[in-house]
Image: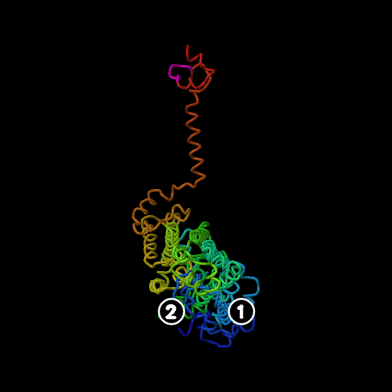
Amino acid sequence: MNDLPFGFSPSGDDDDRRRGDKSGKNGPDSGAGGDASSGGAASGGAQNPFGFAMGGEGGFDPGSFDPSQLGQMFSQLGNMFSGMGAGMTSGSGGGPVNYQVATNLARQQIGNFTPVLDKETQAVVDAVRLAEVWIDDVTTFPSGVSRSVAWTPVQWLEESMPTWKRLCDPVATQLSRTWEQNLPPEAAQFAGPMMGMLTQMSGMAFGTQLGQGLGQLAKEVLTSTDIGLPLAPEGVAVLLPEAIATFADGLEQPAQEIIVFLAAREAAHVRLFTHVGWLRQRLLSTVEEYARGISIDFSGIADLTSGVDPQELLSNPSKLEELIGSSASFEPTTTPEQKAALARLETLLALIEGWVEQVVSRALDDRIPSSVALTETMRRRRASGGPAEQTFATLVGMELRPRKVREASALWRDLLAASDITTRDGVWAHPDLMPDADDLDHPAAFIDGVIGGGASTFDDPIAQLEQTMAAERAERTKDAPDDAGDTDAGGPGDGDTDDQDPPRGPASSS
């Protein structure tokens, strides 16, 4: 598209604007390393940001440290982090992930970017406002957008980093803790004096892989919710004009319609995350639940260490390399609990995407001719490994399968056809009401349950407790005359009760 509306310019236009990041007003100085390959950033960057000991090229294996080659490793890291010394010395690498390194490397990989102009920000505001009016008719959730903005890739990186920290810390922390706790005694004896150095280098390695992944992702995401998670502050709708211009340039659809379509998707996501109070926390806590179950199978290395002389490890570094270099010995194992957590996460993400797809389709189908084609384009984007799939595949070892999204979308569509908008949206009232993976495979039973009162008659736990207590009080009140102290209560039919009441013993025996 050569003439984008709303002032959205293709990423190749206006070289003077693309150099705006060097002015210090719109982003970091990316002159040294604007090329994605600079500093090794392009080497498998988006394939395995964490490199959870999967071995092979592009993955970081925490068992691959060779003490005899520490000098070479530092040299390589120095070259990789050229121009990023602040991230390595600022003290920000004390945690499981060195986020300063991740941020600097991601900025370097982003390179030159197009600063956002005022007319582009106004275009986003107008597109979101129009989409909101149309969405009002197809959902019971009110608008959740308090502010609409346009972001550069660097702004997306900076604004989303708090959420990435929450997602990444549990995984990296648990993996590092498991590795340290299960290090064989022989290796631990050797590594003890340098464990602090290894921990710092591990944080840098995690930061490196994360930075490479986020640097690539920042140039591809179209909105703040493009990967299914709410990465912007609550109530903020975000579009990224530069990525949208590139996305639109490859489609044979009117650019105006593309922008309104993406604005509608963002507005629908924001509504859902704003008014379903448990949703954001549930997504993040599911990732944390997965992280808590990470373990590493050290059985192979235990066999290797049997009979090893610790002195040999000190005098023969190649023996230590042999000891800890087997990638199979350090591959994380997936527990049944983790598989269950991943299944819940995948299902919830599919339900979010399916609901948004249905809401946007109903809001735009009669107004934007290209809505159906654009919906299918987004599905193909997921199927070909878009940002969402790459992010979750590298972060937690799962993919958001397009099949699940299609099934979730069909479930929401069929539920609406069998009931109404209020019933459909009422399912989001509580996590216990949500469909599970089996419901996506067999939606009829779930829909019958909702229509039969599954959602409309649901009581929260407090209400259920109060109802139970009220029933018990009513039952005691009904039985109260049998226990009363009046003369009418002492008949032959009261024998069982009287036997439990010593003061009435003589009356009962008479």
Kindly identify which residue carries mark 1: 84
- Tell me what residue is drawn at x 50 percent, y 37 percent: 469
What amino acid is at disc 2? Pro
Circle 2 Cα neighbour tier, 10 Å, few/some/many (<14 / 14–19 / ≥20): some
Q: Is residue 68 magenta?
A: no
Q: Position of residue 94 (x, y in %)?
A: 62, 68
Q: Does the magenta-highlighted stretch encompass residue 491?
A: yes
Rendering coords of residue 182 (x, y %): 51, 62
Residue ranking furthest to the right? 90
What residue is shown with label 2? 254
Majority SS type along the magenta span: helix
From this viewpoint, is residue 116 visible? no
Task: Looking at the image, tell me whether mark 1 or mark 2 is earlier in sequence order.
Answer: 1
Is there a contact, CB below 8 Å, between mark 1 and mark 2? no
Nearest to the observer: residue 43 or residue 453:
43
Q: Amino acid at mark 1?
A: Met
- Position of 472 with respect to 103 (left or right) is left
Q: Residue at x 44, y 62 (%)?
A: 299
Q: The N terminus is located in which quarter?
A: bottom left
Residue located farthest toward the bottom when viewing the structure as drawn: 15
Q: Which residues are magenta?
A: 490-495
